[in-house]
Amino acid sequence: MNSFEYYNPVRVVFGPGTLQRVGEEAAKLGTSAMIVSYADHKLLKPVLTQAESLMKAAGVSSITFLEVEPNPEIGTVERGVQIAKESGVDMVVGIGGGSAMDAAKAIAAGFYYSGDLWNMVYSRHDNVDAIPPEKALPMLMVSTLPATASEMNQCAVVSNPALKEKSYIWGECLFPKTAILDPELTTTLPTFQTACGAADTISHVLEIYFNGQDKSDLLHRWQEGVMRNVIENLPKVLANEADIDARTELQWTATCALNGWASPGDAWTPMHQVGHVLTSRHGINHGSTLSIIMPAWMEYYKSTKPERCFTFATRVMGIDPEGKSQSEVIDEGLCAFRRFLKTSGVPITMSEKGVTKADIPAIVEGVKTVSFGSDGMLSCNPPVSAEDISNILLKAL
Amino acid sequence: MNSFEYYNPVRVVFGPGTLQRVGEEAAKLGTSAMIVSYADHKLLKPVLTQAESLMKAAGVSSITFLEVEPNPEIGTVERGVQIAKESGVDMVVGIGGGSAMDAAKAIAAGFYYSGDLWNMVYSRHDNVDAIPPEKALPMLMVSTLPATASEMNQCAVVSNPALKEKSYIWGECLFPKTAILDPELTTTLPTFQTACGAADTISHVLEIYFNGQDKSDLLHRWQEGVMRNVIENLPKVLANEADIDARTELQWTATCALNGWASPGDAWTPMHQVGHVLTSRHGINHGSTLSIIMPAWMEYYKSTKPERCFTFATRVMGIDPEGKSQSEVIDEGLCAFRRFLKTSGVPITMSEKGVTKADIPAIVEGVKTVSFGSDGMLSCNPPVSAEDISNILLKAL
């Protein structure tokens, strides 16, 4: 196993009906909240109204900041911070999926931040050293989309359209105080968003499973557990959107995929780095970038990491190895994974989203700008070069 | 899945060599520490000396309280509290296995507790309502025995020899601030203690796997991962005590077995309840009580929970089900588990420890006194009666 430091102080309130706890939990954190959610909040309207009223009943007044777009932009964060300061709120409540929660986290940290908020962004590799935030307003998250685990981690992803960059803010002050995960809130999620969230969940452990440094069988088995649980429960939800048991499984599994438990000390996410560029340059939603990149990247690893591909095929995809060669098993596993993704309704090639071979050099350049290290490589096991990424993207066409 | 609330704010510093961090980490918590460890600390002497000197170099003075016995007694805790108060320390450093850490936790909480410290004990079912502690001195734990996960949970087990009771203190104030897990410190552990710790680790998830309320496949797979990892790594350590990779696996696996991750919201531990009575009445060490009780209890479940027994056999013990009946597979799995325990050097019957059929009624009575609910049953899935426990103990003879 790796050496690591682990810390995650988020209090989780999990289970169907737990939205009812939002007032009581908010009251532990402050008296005056800013509720942060989407500009497009048609589906969430009843949740927002209920949260506001439960908080009011618990003695917590609130204002709303309903301006967040998918892949929240730094300008939106800046507006949120300005309003939070003007209103003198003492806490932030994020309600929604990863984008709403990430915006809420960035606003909570931006509240105390001096200078250009884009300086908070940690992982850009331009000439400006990031200065991560060290203090934030206390946060309560109500997660309505099982995917990013933002409700239980110290990361917020924000985009800068001027720079065509999408990257991370990272720091202990970004841990929410409390996360409410009520699977009943996810039963109205459209099928496509549910599937995208599931692809994102799988990617959070699959990245580590294939690219991580760690050889711990405990962690591999936990990562396999996450992937299997998504693969078993997503079809149930797609067949019956109201299946609360399967929704419940998907929600907790998504949180466990990126709260540090399944990969302490192992945080390389090369597939996400490439995915972020597909989002920032081609507007492809986050989950879809990963459903496209994962199989292509695994194709690339068939020759270099056959043993890991084999355990993926047998333990995750349930391929029976009896009487088959290793490469047959690997191919069957990858084929089954592609079929699972395709059946779920998410894209598995860039061409489905209008990206062509001619776009590849600019995408690679985008990854280099945002995510390459000073060694001229993308952190991975082993590190990958610009040429490697180009070859992987060719397999994703 | 169950509904649950989860919270665990312990900062973990994990990896070979991390004892070097003890001064730096202690200095974040206070300036004057009480180091709590065993009366019999021959093996730990170099660690204690090094910790003291690293803390001193970091500006943290310390006194030592080296009086803890295996299964720490409430009288020992009382003496520790008295000395801590007289010395005016502002933090507690527990160094050792579960008993040393539990004593350290009880002392840290007892420091602020009014009245009889035995009132802190939470799970007795006598006529005195327990009053759990609400405040404790900040704690740093250096865990040297992979077993109890005390370094990363909110529980401390203490014994009362006058009452022949062994039970829990439970409360959020018992979470250590920081846990240092340095697998190098475990390489000098005697073989038998290592095996007892491994049996304890397995029991922490096996209890939930068989008796829990939760049907989540994610959690079952995580529990299986814990058990498999112990089963794979313990033999390596028993063959080569200095195998740092296997020691590292065992240590993190032990922590993960009881820090809440593998069973959030599912905390019934009927096997532990019976085990505690075997300790308090017959002096059998904790790990051995569990290596004795686990197979007997599983024998009992062969008829009532055959499906769970089957997945244990195939997924945990690796039994190939091909061409076998369900009951054959189950028997092979249980047989393989008994063989694993026996080969590891821990007892698998009460008679090996001198306990006879005639002792069973008093043991059952002990479980009733300490752990039965007001419904006259022991919490379990389904709940078990005094007669059930008696039958299970007959299978453990």
Image (tube, coloured by chain):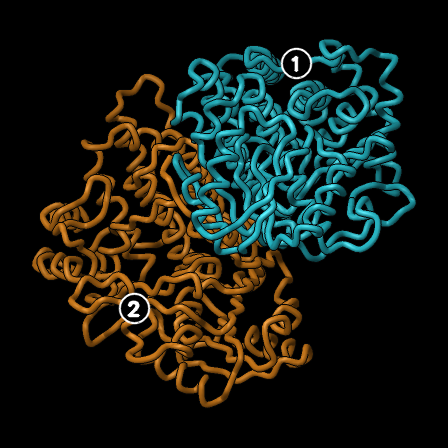
Chain colours: A orange, B cyan
Which residue of the protein is positioned furthest toward the bottom in this rendering?
Answer: A86
A100 vs A11: above or below: below
Residue drawn where x is 34% and y is 43% of the image: A206
Query: Which structural element holds mark 1?
Result: loop
Discs 2 and 1 carry the same chain letter: no
Q: Quadrant of residue B156?
A: top right
Marks 2 and 1 sit apart, C-alpha to C-alpha, by 57 Å
B226 vs A185: above or below: above
**Residue B263 appears in view:** no
Q: Position of residue B372 (x, y in %)?
A: 84, 37
Q: Quickly name the residue at label 2.
A: A131
Locate residue A191 relative to residue A300 in the image: left or right.
right
Locate residue B268 relative to residue B178 in the image: left or right.
right
B68 vs B134: above or below: above
Q: Position of residue B272 (x, y in %)?
A: 71, 31
Find residue B347 and name its label.
1
Residue drawn where x is 22% and y is 45% of the image: A296
Q: Label 1 is found on which chain of the structure?
A: B
Front: mark 2 or 1? 2
Residue drawn where x is 24% and y is 56% of the image: A273
For this rendering, which residue is in front, B147 or B210?
Answer: B147
Q: Which amino acid type is shown beneath numbered disc 1?
A: Pro
**Residue B176 appears in view:** yes
Locate residue B102 relative to residue A120 in the image: left or right.
right
